[in-house]
Image (spheres, rainbow, N blue to C red):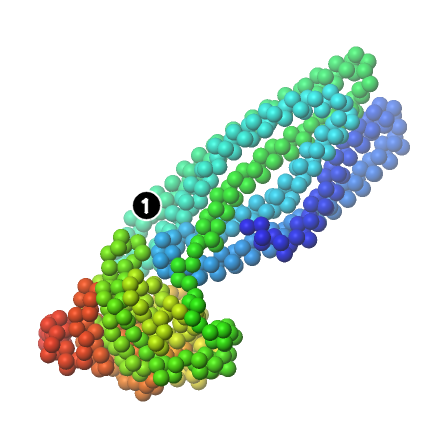
Amino acid sequence: MLKYLKKYWIFCLLAPLFMFGEVAMDLIQPDMMADIVDNGVLKSDMNLIITVGIRMILFVMLGGFCGVMCGVFANIAAQGFGNDLRKDLFSRIMSLSFQQTDKISTGSLVTRLTNDVTQVQNMVMMAIRGFVRNTVMFVGGIIMLYRQSPKFAVIAACGLPFVVLFVTFFLKKASPLFAVVQKKLDGINNVMQEDVAGARVVKAYVKEEHELKRFDAANEALCTENLRVQTLLAFMGPCMNIVLNLCIVAVILVGGLTVKGGGDMTPGNIMAAITYLSQILHGITFMANIFQTFTRAKASADRINEVLNSPEVIKDGEGATAAAGAASKENTAAGTAIRRAIANTDRKGEIEFRNVSFAYPESAGDSVLENISFTVKQGETLAIIGATGSGKSSLVNLIPRFYDATEGAVLVDGKNVKDYKLKELRDKISIVLQRAELYSRSIEANIRWGKDDATPWKIKEAATTAQADDFICASKYGYHTLVTEGGHSLSGGQKQRISIARAVLKEHEILNFDDSTSALDLKTEAMLYEALRNECPDTTKIIIAQRIASVKGADKIAVLDNGRIAALGTHEELLKESEIYQDIYRSQMKEGGQE
């Protein structure tokens, strides 16, 4: 993922340069202190103490300036890196197929987009700032320590292998545990996401205590794994300090014996040596923390790369022309005209299924649809009815390529959907899903999703067609009424009608209703379908419904039974020929229903 740092290379270069200046100032300080002790304090030279003291203050200020600039540049690089990575990861998540998002949980994707990116971002900061600082501090400290006395350098060299051994041992043990910690964090996010989204169900069934226990279990699992890691790493600090203090004792012992024996060593040299040794070994200790951050970040980076490098399951087709692709990319009125001109106008909105079979990727080969064949001409309405689980939604999901057919071919305008660019194909289709998905913004903004540049008049026109204009205008703020998260401030029927208005507003050749009028009363539903026939006569419509009253006006009705088309015809034909349709009709129309 280092490619994300390329655009910030200048900051990645400047930060270490300023850090080098800060460390240089830190390394000069002990040598100057030795000069004050040996030539100032011991010789009672107050002028030297003041002169060197002022110089030390100036060097400290210069080092502080370098440290601030290093921090600024390192943060610019790290934050820019995190920003770009997070945007690319979100973009990749948005492009994942349903098959892939079904496999990776929502909670896990949230964790990867937030916590995992933060871990990698912290690693970048550590690499630019901490790693450079401690590397320079280690090398410079050894050199300065050697200048005080080669004996001190030998002491540091004797302690160094033990430090490296401790760091290697503890980080090797901790490395696999970080991946486990991130998975446990996924579990927390999964529970949170499910309980927040399903809060009404939880309260309705008085399951707050049950969900609290479920959350406690996930939280306890995360806490346990974190404690395992931190307990292991807690031993590393004391072990490092033991080595550090033993080295300091050795320096004092060797220095004291040398001074006592009349050697060329001074008290100032010993003080400077202790300081340099502390800087070196503390730097190594800090390096251990950096490697700990790197180890944790690697676990997060692997999880991020799993998403970024995931193969495209639903790929763009090769059959779309360059002109159509360019027009689609520009998303202009001229582009739309070119795209439509390229399409076969005689078959615009035509849908054909040729011997289509389908099984979900994780279903061990069990077919949901088998040998489906039918054709819907431009402007026709096909209704699909059948028992729950018969494959109705799975069938319509093959048209915009939410999934790909296992066998056979799905054609739109006479061309296999696999030959389209995904954007070109989905631009032809408006979909109203079973669950009305609304966003926490105004009603107008929710409808405008269908077409960004729609005028207020067009939005009102679409809402009128969807039978939503009356209740919208009756509210205090009209189309500017804010919708709460998930649309919970609206009734089920209101949410469905706003979703329908959004679909109607979009320029489309095909309109799919996936059981999206279930919350409407029969009168409102009948008015909706009448308005659609008048306002969208050339639009091909596919309607999935459970009620006979919803489908009887369609040009064709397909009766699905266990993934197969058991019958296909008009309402009158099916009443005569299809036993399944007759059973549905009798249960709804004769037993308390109405024609």
> Considering only vertical position in the picture, is 354 above or below 24?
below
Residue at the disc numbered 1: 213
**Residue extending farthest top:** 261
* Residue at image point 34% right, 63% down: 403
User: Is residue 480 shown left or right of residue 411?
Assistant: right
Q: Quadrant of residue 255?
A: top right
Q: Amino acid at mark 1?
A: Lys
Q: Position of residue 114 (x, y in %)?
A: 49, 52
Tell me if I can see residue 462 in this picture: no
Q: Is 54 displayed left or right of 231 in the figure?
A: right
User: x, y (%) of residue 534?
Assistant: 31, 87
Relative to 588, residue 171 above or below: above
- Residue 469: image quadrant is bottom left
Return the x and y of residue 3 as percentages of the image width and height.
Answer: 58, 53
Left or right, residue 278 beside residue 372: right
Residue at point 58% right, 54% down?
4
Residue 460 visible, this orientation: yes
The residue depicted at 48 percent of the width and 37 percent of the height is 175
Q: Is 246 in front, or is 324?
A: 324
